[in-house]
Image: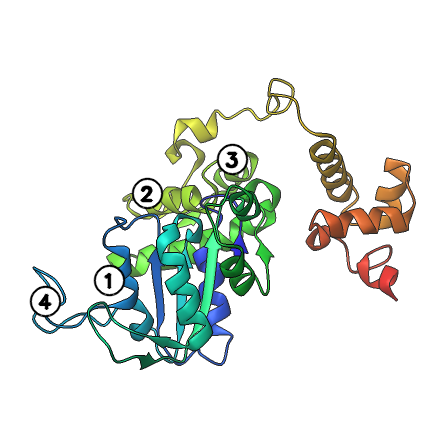
């Protein structure tokens, strides 16, 4: 299960997992559980046989599970799955068989299922709006994707990916961002995460210029001031403040645990434990004072 804020790129991660898996030669089929009307999601997922209901296609519909046979099914926004369908989804995952709506013959399926959500499913379980047995079935391996504002080093890589993607769509030569434009993009905190960045790159590719400068960017990005983000916001929890200080120290000392621990006035072991707690291992320098030395 992949968790993270809306727009952090959960589907991109799911596609990467698919491409690196034994199912990579099969299809990657994605469905957004929040985008489909409640009354249609069952037939979208499980399909239906001819004549299953008024208005059904004469040939029926395979459904996403059967379409993904031999590949990966990505269930985005799984927290929006209607409660009454969760038991049927659980049964399909357990039995690896799917019965179309209106049908009686189960169809065997061989797929990898990846789910994603931006909701607190454990809270939903306590509120009895999400089944605990389905949660534990899906949450075998959990990947939490940090928001883009906490992994700004990814911005140039993502920009290159989206530049190639949209340049190919409109058959345009390579667009490039100037250093000034890149600085503005890395200064911005991206409340819309990767999805917002993708929209900005798509806009840039559709400009007539091959080189995108700072003045080509939306004004809310070039005029952005992040100095007030925390001073004028609601109170943060102690854990949120601690996480922010650790991120600041690791970035200041380029991932060197020894120097960061000294600046925070805590021991290396304590800092490393907190780094793992807050999923910040990616910020550690692998050289002297970094994670590998600590573990060795």
Q: Which of marks 2 and 4 is nearer the N terminus?
A: 4
The residue that mark 4 highlights is 57
Pick whichever, 202 or 136, lies toward us: 136
The alpha-carbon separation of the residues under discs 2 and 4 comes to 39 Å
Q: Residues within 10 Å of mark 4 (few under 14, many from 20)?
A: few
Q: Is residue 163 positioned above or below 48 on the image?
A: above
Q: Where is residue 11 in the image (x, y as percent from the top left)?
A: 43, 57
The alpha-carbon separation of the residues under discs 3 and 1 comes to 45 Å
The residue that mark 2 highlights is 203
**Viewer-nearest of discs 3 and 1:** 1
The alpha-carbon separation of the residues under discs 2 and 1 comes to 36 Å
**Viewer-nearest of discs 4 and 3:** 4
Q: Which numbered marker is on residue 184?
A: 3
Q: What element carries label 3?
A: helix
Q: Residues within 10 Å of mark 2 (few under 14, many from 20)?
A: some
Q: Which of marks 4 and 3 is nearer the N terminus?
A: 4
At a point 54% along the width and 44% down the height, the residue shown is: 120
Q: Residues within 10 Å of mark 1 (few under 14, many from 20)?
A: some
**Viewer-nearest of discs 2 and 1:** 1
Q: Is residue 212 positioned above or below 172 on the image?
A: above
Q: Can residue 98 be seen in this view?
A: yes
Q: Which numbered marker is on residue 43?
A: 1
Q: Which of marks 2 and 3 is nearer the N terminus?
A: 3
Q: Which of marks 3 and 1 is nearer the N terminus?
A: 1
At a point 72% along the width and 41% down the height, the residue shown is: 247
Q: Quadrant of residue 239?
A: top right
The alpha-carbon separation of the residues under discs 4 and 3 comes to 51 Å
The alpha-carbon separation of the residues under discs 4 and 1 comes to 12 Å
Q: Is mark 2 on a helix, strand or loop?
A: helix
Q: Which numbered marker is on residue 65?
A: none
Q: Which of marks 2 and 1 is nearer the N terminus?
A: 1
């Amino acid at each position: 299960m992949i968790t993270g804020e809306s727009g952090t790129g959960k589907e991109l991660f799911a596609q990467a997992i698919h491409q690196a898996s034994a199912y990579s030669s099969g299809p990657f089929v994605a469905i957004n559980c929040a985008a489909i009307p409640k009354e249609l999601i069952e037939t979208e997922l499980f399909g239906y046989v001819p004549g299953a209901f008024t208005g059904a296609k004469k040939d029926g519909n395979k459904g996403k599970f059967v379409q993904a046979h031999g590949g990966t099914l990505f269930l985005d926004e799984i927290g929006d799955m209607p409660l009454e369908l969760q038991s049927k989804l659980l049964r399909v995952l357990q039995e690896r068989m799917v019965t179309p709506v209106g049908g009686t013959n189960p169809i065997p399926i061989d797929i990898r299922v990846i789910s994603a959500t931006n909701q607190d499913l454990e809270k939903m379980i306590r509120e009895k709006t999400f089944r605990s047995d389905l949660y534990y079935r899906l949450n075998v391996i959990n990947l939490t994707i940090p928001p883009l504002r906490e992994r700004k080093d990814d911005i140039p890589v993502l920009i290159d990916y989206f530049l190639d993607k949209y340049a190919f769509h409109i058959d345009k030569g390579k667009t490039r961002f100037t250093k000034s434009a890149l600085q503005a993009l890395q200064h911005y905190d991206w409340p819309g995460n990767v999805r917002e960045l993708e929209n900005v790159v798509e806009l840039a590719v559709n400009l007539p210029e091959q080189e995108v400068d700072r003045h080509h960017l939306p004004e809310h990005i070039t005029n952005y001031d992040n100095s007030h983000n925390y001073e004028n916001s609601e109170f943060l929890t102690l854990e949120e403040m601690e996480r922010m200080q650790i991120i600041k120290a690791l970035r200041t000392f380029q991932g060197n645990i020894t120097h960061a621990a000294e600046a925070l006035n805590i021991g290396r072991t304590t800092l490393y434990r907190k780094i793992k707690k807050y999923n910040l291992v990616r910020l550690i320098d692998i050289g002297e004072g970094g994670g590998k030395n600590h573990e060795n």
